[in-house]
Image (cartoon, rainbow, N blue to C red):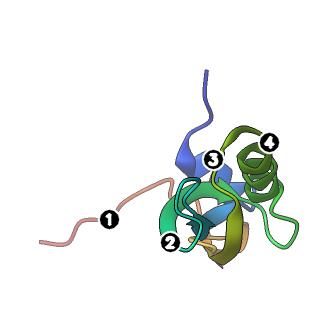
Amino acid sequence: MPISETELMLKGYGLTTAEFFYRMPDFTHVLNTFVWQEYDIAPDHPRLFQFVEYWQSEIEGPLHSVRFTHRKMISPGEWRNVTGEFTLH
C-alpha cells in the first residue's frame, strides 16, 4: 500500500519541482523543457538524482541544465494531534 502525502510530509519530505532543459535529438540547436514534481528529502534529493540518472540512460534528448526548488509543506513540529473539540453557542 503506498504511503500518503501527509505521511511523507511528516517524515520530512517536501515537494521538489524540477525544470529540465534538454536538446531535441534531431534538432540539437533547439532547447525544450520538461517539468517534474515529486516528494523528496532535502538536501540530498535522492528521487531527483534517480530521475536524472534515468533520463541520462533511457531518454535520447541530452540534458542542457536542470533548475529545481524544494518546499517543505509541513514539518513534524507543526503538526499536532487534536483529541477534543469545544463548541461555543
The three-letter code of the residue at mark 2 reads: Val
Judging by the rendered image, the residue that carries numbered circle 1 is 86
Cβ atoms under marks 3 and 4 closer than 8 Å: no
Residue 4 locus on image (x, y percent): 55, 40
Tag in front: 2 or 1: 2
Tag in front: 1 or 4: 4
Q: Which mark is residue 7?
A: 3
Looking at the rendering, which quadrant does residue 75 occupy?
bottom right
Q: In percent of the image, x 77 and y 50: which residue is there?
A: 56
The foreground one among 54 and 14 is: 54
Within 10 Å of disc 3 (Cα), the crowding (few <14, some 14-19, many 20+) is: few
**Would residue 80 be seen by someone viewing this image from the given angle?**
yes
Mark closer to the chain start, 4 or 2: 2
Q: CA distance from mark 3 to mark 4?
A: 31 Å
Q: Which mark is residue 30?
A: 2
Looking at the rendering, which quadrant does residue 14 occupy?
bottom right
Mark closer to the chain start, 1 or 4: 4
Mark closer to the chain start, 3 or 1: 3
Q: CA distance from mark 3 to mark 1?
A: 27 Å
> Which of the image's four quarters has the C terminus?
bottom left
Mark closer to the chain start, 3 or 2: 3
The three-letter code of the residue at mark 4 reads: Ser
The three-letter code of the residue at mark 3 reads: Glu
The three-letter code of the residue at mark 1 reads: Phe
Q: CA distance from mark 2 to mark 1?
A: 61 Å
The residue tagged with tag 4: helix, strand or loop?
helix
The residue tagged with tag 2: helix, strand or loop?
loop
Q: Which mark is residue 57?
A: 4
The residue tagged with tag 3: helix, strand or loop?
helix
Residue 20 locus on image (x, y percent): 60, 67
